[in-house]
Amino acid sequence: MWSKKEAKFVDADSDILEQKHLSNTRAEQTDFEMFVPCDLQPNEIGYVKVIKIDKVKDSEVPSDQSAAANTLAIEGISQDSEVLFLFKNK
């Protein structure tokens, strides 16, 4: 993000949200949103420079053996366009 104070681009915290959508025909679409916290004043413009880097390894979530046995799957779509899920607790 551009820093007026330093007159250069500086690293900024960001978060990327991946959203998967399921249509009535069960076609899956994915879109992404990037959130960059910034403090902009009215009528002020902010610049963000996005650079592709090698994939960063996600932090690993501690494994819970009891949770690993559970499954959640999409069973289908109802006539009212509701997504039906099937949860199995093993």
Image: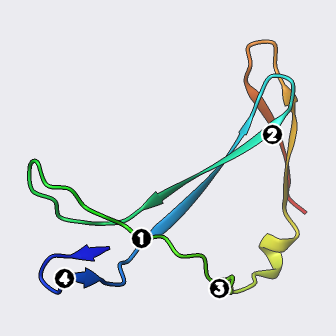
The reply to whether dot 3 and dot 4 touch (C-beta < 8 Å) is no
Give the amino acid at mark 3.
Val
Distance Cα–Cα, label 2 vs label 3: 25 Å
Q: Residue at x 69, y 82 (%)?
A: 55
Name the foreground residue: 88 vs 44: 44
Spatial separation of the CA atoms under disc 3 and disc 1: 18 Å
N-terminal of the pair, mark 1 or mark 2, is 2
Q: Which residue: 60% across, 76% down?
A: 52
Which quadrant would residue 57 be assigned to in this image? bottom right
Q: Tell me: residue 85, above or below residue 3.
A: above
Query: Mark 1 sits on what residue?
Result: 49
Q: Within the image, what quadrant is residue 58 found in? A: bottom right
Q: CA distance from mark 1 to mark 2?
A: 30 Å
* Closer to the eye: label 4 or 2: 4
**Which residue is more in the foreground, 58 or 86?**
58
Q: Which residue is mark 3?
A: 56
Q: Residues within 10 Å of mark 3 (few under 14, many from 20)?
A: few
* Type of amino acid at the residue the image marks with label 4: Ala
In terms of secondary structure, where does tag 3 sit?
loop
Q: What is the number of the mark on residue 28?
A: 2
Q: Provide the residue designation for mark 4.
A: 7
Q: Which residue corresponds to the image point at 81% horizontal and 12% vertical from the top-left?
A: 79
Residue 7: x, y in percent?
18, 82
